Amino acid sequence: MGDTYESEALLNQYLLFHYGTAKDQFPYDFNISEAFDFPVRCAQEGINLGALNETGRALDLGCSVGRSTFELAKSFDSVTGIDYSSSFIQAAQKLKSKGSHAVNYLEEGTQFNQSEVFVDSDIIRERVSFECGDAQNLRSDLGSFDFVLACNLICRLPSPMALLDRLPTLVRPKGQLFITTPFTWLEEYTPRENWLGSGGEDSFSGLQNALGKHFKLLKHWDMPFLIREHSRKFQFSIAQASRWVRVED
């Protein structure tokens, strides 16, 4: 086991686990059911469709296996999903072509269950395209979009500012931008000097400072999400969500 249980961070986690108040351990009113369908909620809640001039093109950055991308196709004529992971993009492309994908999920130990997931039948899958790409170095001919989605991405980039500096060219004037992030800064992903807001001390202020010249903040709120690891272990996280409008230069 080595020094697994000898870190200061883990010591403090367990002190709070054993002795902390309920409010100290979980200072939110969310229940577990509110954490389901996070990709769908991002696509639905992230947009104010009534305030958009056009619904021609949308972009889903860090699209993973594509659920938000497909959901955006209910509102936009063309949606591009981009992710760094080739396996995620291959799965998304299979979902586009076949409408379904097998999934093996862990119960415990070496026991897995097999199931199948499906794209909603009312989604026009031909409106969607997927490609591999680095959100910090997107291809120059990507063009501009009426809506850009970037869910749980920026705190997994080595250089978040490389993306934030590119966003004004990706979002058309009066177009909208929706960002979610739990601000889980880890040096294995992002060097500490690149954490937003004075080393991650006030990350949302750092985000506002980065976007404030070209975007106006419309709304911000908390969004829970749940990721299953196995039948008895789940990641329950709270993303900070914010909707922005691209202002005229």
Image (spheres, helix red, strand yellow):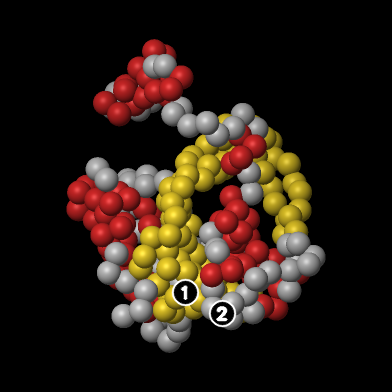
- Mark closer to the chain start, 1 or 2: 2
State whether residue 79 appears in this view.
yes
Question: Is 45 on the left-hand or right-hand side of 170?
Answer: right
SS category of the residue bearing label 1: strand
Using a 10 Å C-alpha cutoff, classify the residue at mark 1 as few (fewer than 14 neighbours), some (14 to 19) or many (20 or more): many
Q: Position of residue 233 (x, y in %)?
A: 57, 32
Indicate the secondary structure of the residue bearing disc 2: loop
Q: Residue drawn 27% across and 54% down? A: 206
Q: Is residue 97 above or below residue 46?
A: below
**Residue name at image x 76 percent, y 53 percent:** 116
Across and down, in percent, residue 30 comes to: 55, 34
Q: Is residue 104 left or right of residue 51?
A: right
Can see residue 86? Answer: no
Checking the image for residue 54, the label placed there is 2
Rendering quarter of residue 225: top right
Where residue 125 sits: x, y (%)? 71, 73
The residue depicted at 59 percent of the width and 32 percent of the height is 31
Residue most extreme to the right: 121
